[in-house]
Amino acid sequence: MTMLERIMVVEDDPDILDIFEMSLAMLGGFDVTLCENAREALERIPLSEPQLIVLDVMLPELSGPDALPMIRALPGGSRRVIVIMTARASAQGRAAYLDLGADEVLFKPFEPTELPGVLRAVWDARQQRA
């Protein structure tokens, strides 16, 4: 099984990006790429080659759900694990994001100390299905 090493986080709130960076880089030991919007992410994905992408729903210009199929269409997109992140927790919303092609849904607020383990578990589950 391939180890999870590279994660991209797409989030427009700088405070939340700081939390992700501390949680994933410092606690989790991951190589983390931070993007403030989906357009930046689409440009940087071919360069940073993230294995897993955390994609916020509410982003300026291009929402996470609108960007998701664009990310999947990039070379290697079908192999990437995409976790949609939202503050609106509901079973229907989760199902809709999974139907769009997300591998999992992360609800805000989340516990930063648990985040590396949560994302590793999502990665491992996807690797077992592949």
Image: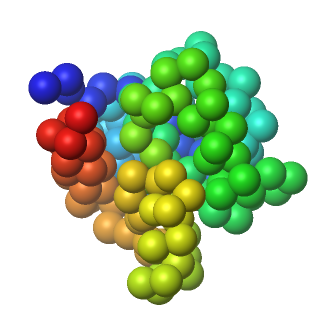
Residue in view at x 53 percent, y 78 percent:
93
Drawn side of residue 47 relative to residue 4, left or right: right
Residue, far right: 61
Q: Position of residue 103 (x, y in %)?
A: 39, 52
Residue in view at x 32 percent, y 31 percent:
30
Q: Position of residue 126 (x, y in %)?
A: 26, 43
Q: Is residue 15 above or below residue 109?
A: above
Q: Which corner quadrant holds the N terminus?
A: top left
Drawn side of residue 59 relative to residue 9, left or right: right
Residue in view at x 15 percent, y 40 percent:
128
Q: Is residue 120 above or below residue 4?
A: below
Q: Position of residue 48 (x, y in %)?
A: 53, 18
Drawn side of residue 106 relative to residue 8, left or right: left
Residue, far top: 47
What colouring method underlies this structural image?
rainbow
Q: Which corner quadrant holds the C terminus?
A: top left
User: Quadrant of the rendered structure where residue 115 is?
Assistant: bottom left
Q: Position of residue 23 (x, y in %)?
A: 35, 48
User: Quadrant of the rendered structure where residue 35 is?
Assistant: top right
Q: Is residue 35 visible?
A: no
Residue in view at x 49 percent, y 21 percent:
76
Disc tally is 0
Q: Is residue 126 visible?
A: yes
